[in-house]
Image (spheres, helix red, strand yellow):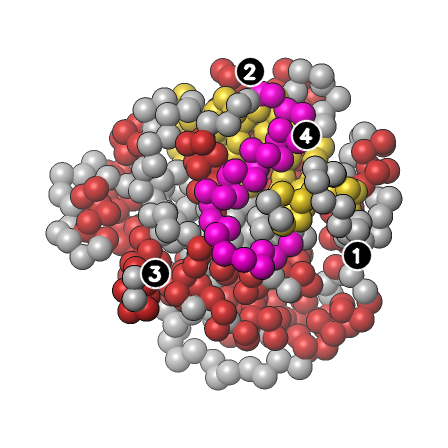
Amino acid sequence: MDTDSRLSRRQLIAASATAGTLCLITQAGLAEAASAAVAPAPFAGGDSIRPFRAHFPDADLSDLRRRVLATRWPSKEVVADDTQGVQLATIQALANHWGTKYDWRRCEARINAFPNFLTEIDGVDIHFIHVRSKNPNALPVIITHGWPGSIIEQMKVIEPLTNPEKYGGNAADAFDVVIPSLPGHGFSAKPSGLGWDPIRIAKAWAVLMKRLGYTRYVAQGGDWGNAVTEQLALLKPAGLIGIHTNMPATLPDNVSAALAGGPTPTGLSPDEQSAWTQLDYFWKHGLGYAQEMAGRPQSLYALEDSPIGLAAWMLDHDISSYRMISRVFAGGTEGLTPDDVLDNITLYWLTKTAVSSARLYWESKLAFFAPKGVTLPTAISAYPDEIYTAPKSWTEKAYPNLIHYNRMPKGGHFAAWEQPALFVSELRTGLRSLR
């Protein structure tokens, strides 16, 4: 394939494969092991699992604050809305909080309150949080984040999932929770070679769950987490009995064709028409970040050099999430707080993973929203402010073994992060029949 053909293909992929985006644990032994190391343990190879503790030098935090406060600002947008992108008032409010009030050490302590580990799989060190429930019959679940997310997304749901009786559930609802960082994201290593697409990551997750000794488990994900989880379901590794997703891939062929320039679909139900309206808006106004990362990820040097540049890039993922975050920094009360938002951005900054995480878009050749033929039992939660709210009619066709479907009353792209109580309830309910 010549260079022009390859670029053309990647541009096509970018247009169809997008969206990608507490308490102390009660198990003293695992928590003690997790805090035993002050940094990644030396590479050991093989199938060893090493404890990990997050820590960044004070100099890194001082440099971050200096860069935030020294930002060279552009002129204000010349429209009264967000049609030109992240608004100056929003990003300056974020910068003020980041540069004068934000405390990374608080977030670092939250991360380290959980058992964190590293293990090498297929030549890459994979970071993961692993919390076992005190219930010996707990159902293990591996939960995968997306972009611009991270393990920060799921930390709010760890204790409710592992200790349900304390959070309004029954002991029979308990999960063991495994939350890995995608390769090139957060505390996982940056692949130095090619080929780390969702399929290869899914294979690594199967190795991880086997290495942890699980012979029966489920998987969950949204955004890239959904792509990886679906590929895991297609692999059908021994032990995987079902999946849950909060961003399913359900588009019928005529809808995909319409997004690629074909005729507008007709005969849609109200739910289908609403989904089409969301998709049409995103394809026309929200694809920029995905096209750049799928086509030219290495060109994003500015994201590694400017924390405010990184923040604006991450905020501009999807319009509903951006508007929610904008309201948060204007003083509103939403599913996220200013510190929530900055915890996630700061993790990307301190781990220097802006460009390495972008390469996943370059690597993937999957049509993001097209059905993949998953036949394992599947539970779906459809959130109203997601990039699109998957209609039940599309979902039933895309997942022939659908065991649960629910349209949520609120929430968007970062389901576990924004609405943890709803997310936990959905995971309990949706996968209960598999216990």
Q: Tell me the kind of residue under disc 4.
A: Leu
Decide: marks 3, 2 in contact (CB < 8 A)? no
Residue 330 appears in the rendering: no
Residue depicted at x 39% and y 65%: 295
In the picture of the structure, the residue carrying the numbered disc 2 is 435
In the picture of the structure, the residue carrying the numbered disc 1 is 55
Residue depicted at x 60% and y 61%: 353
Residue 213 lies in the magenta-colored region: yes
Residue 318 appears in the rendering: yes
In the picture of the structure, the residue carrying the numbered disc 3 is 10
Q: Which residues are magenta?
A: 189-216
- Mark 4 or mark 2, which has the lower sequence index? 4
Residue depicted at x 63% and y 24%: 214
Q: Tell me the kind of residue under disc 1.
A: His
Q: Is residue 53 above or below residue 95?
A: above
- Mark 3 or mark 4, which has the lower sequence index? 3
Rendered location of residue 270, percent (x, y)? 23, 38
Observer-nearest residue: 205 or 137? 205
- Front label number (4 vs 2): 4
- Residue 212 image label: 4
Q: CA distance from mark 4 to mark 1?
A: 25 Å
Decide: marks 4, 2 in contact (CB < 8 A)? no
Q: Kindly indicate the quadrant of the structure image that contains residue 210.
A: top right
Q: How many marks?
A: 4
